[in-house]
Amino acid sequence: MNVMTLLPFIVLIGAMFLMTRSAKKKQQQAAQMRNQMQPGSGVRTIGGMYATVKEVGDDTVLLEVAPGVHAFYAKNAIGAVLEDEEYNRIIHGDGETDGAPVVPDDASALTADGDAAGDRVDLGKKDAEPGTAGLGKADLGKETTAGEQTPDAADPTGKRDGDTDAK
């Protein structure tokens, strides 16, 4: 056999070996991280929930998700074990910088003058000119302001949609 014929197979096997080796390395690191969990450490689950570890079992972990609220999770559901400083910063907001922008709870804090009438935009409907309600070319066959439907100018009989010819 020719070496050039076997070269693609050798490259493919080598690539598969490298991929499985890196995946196994990541799995070992994740297992080591989960084994480092101790009661009192902060964790983030794979679903994004932050909690405090209360008890660690062989395959399960008892987490306190809120004060007095406990839940059992599989060890594999723990995405990261967090350092105490990082956990407190995320959960309690400890150690935030003073120069960081604060996001307001409502939009009223975003305006400089909340009562300035000149800055407001009127989003209400404007009334049509008197005597022209529903009679413009673009408004033919539409409802008037009183809720009645106007007759179409092209229809001299004055019938409206849904009317039938009476004999």
Image: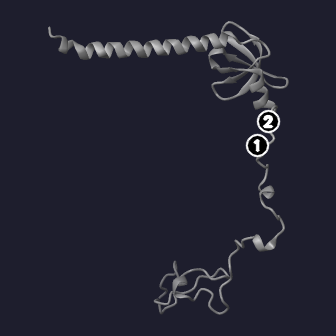
Residue sitting farthest toward the front: 99
Residue 49 appears left or right of 153: right
Q: Nearer the viewer, residue 45 or 128?
A: 45
Where does residue 65 sit, x and y in percent of width and height?
77, 25
Residue 17 appears left or right of 65: left
Residue to which mark 2 is pinned: 96
Residue drawn at x 52%, y 83% as measured from the top left: 138
Where does residue 51 sit, x and y in percent of width and height?
75, 24
Amino acid type for the residue under numbered disc 2: Glu
Q: Is residue 136 above or below residue 109?
A: below
The span from disc 1 to disc 2 (Cα, nearest Å) is 8 Å
Where does residue 73 sit, x and y in percent of width and height?
69, 18
Q: Which mark identifies residue 50?
A: none
Label 2 crowd (10 A; few <14 / some 14-19 / many >=20): few
Residue to which mark 1 is pinned: 100
Placement of the N terminus among the 4 image quadrants: top left
Label 1 crowd (10 A; few <14 / some 14-19 / many >=20): few
Where does residue 112 sit, x and y in percent of width and height?
80, 62
Residue drawn at x 74%, y 26% as measured from the top left: 86
Amino acid type for the residue under numbered disc 1: Ala
Residue drawn at x 84%, y 67% as measured from the top left: 115
Residue sitting farthest toward the left: 1
Marks 1 & 2, CB-CB < 8 Å contact: yes
Residue 96 appears left or right of 166: right
Residue drawn at x 65%, y 93% as measured from the top left: 131
Q: Secondary structure at mark 2?
A: loop
Q: Secondary structure at mark 1?
A: loop
